[in-house]
Amino acid sequence: QVQLIESGGRLVQAGGSLRLSCLLSGPDFTTYVVGWFRQSPGKEREFVGVAGWTNGGAYYPDNVKGRFTIVTEYAESTVYLQMNMLEPRDTGTYYCAAGRPGINYYDPNKYPYWGQGTQVTVSS
């Protein structure tokens, strides 16, 4: 079983930057891809990107492409979500999740392992 722990969420002003961390542990965690999601009250969990460990490749939906970057650091067992040019609509609880390669990365139900979440608030 893979364990994930997020950290780094805080209050930030619009236009600012923030880096979230996701520390992974457990057997064979590098065989999983790591997705990032966010959720606001009353809304569904929203996909904001995914990356694998082997070649560092990442994929982002259009609403964060060019602003968000995922970096996998094998030596640290950590996946980072670098967020730039933050906007109030980026506010939410951010989660990292581990899933098998080839799943529908947009679907949170396809990820069996989740962290506890970290709160990001972007003020205008």
Image: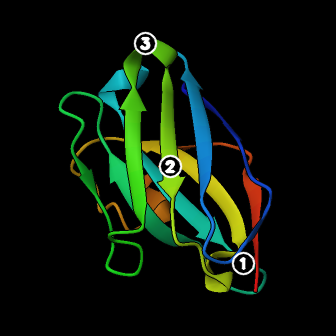
Q: Which amino acid does label 1 sit on?
A: Ser
Q: Is mark 1 on a helix, strand or loop?
A: loop
Q: Which amino acid does label 3 sit on?
A: Ala
Q: Is residue 75 above or below residue 111?
A: above
Identify the residue position indicated by label 3 in the image: 75
Residue at (27, 50) in percent of width and height: 58
Q: Position of residue 124 (x, y in %)?
A: 76, 86
Separation of residues labelled 2 and 3 (CA atoms): 16 Å
Label of residue 5 in the image: none
Instruction: Check disc 3: other Cα within 10 Å, few if <14, some if 14-19, many if 20+.
Output: few
Label of residue 40 in the image: 1
Q: In which quarter of the image is residue 26?
A: top right
- Residue 28, visible in the rendered structure: no
In terms of sequence position, does the residue under pointer 2 or pointer 3 come before the other? 3
Residue at (49, 20) in percent of width and height: 77
Q: Is residue 33 above or below residue 60?
A: above
- Residue 76, visible in the rendered structure: yes
Identify the residue position indicated by label 2 in the image: 81
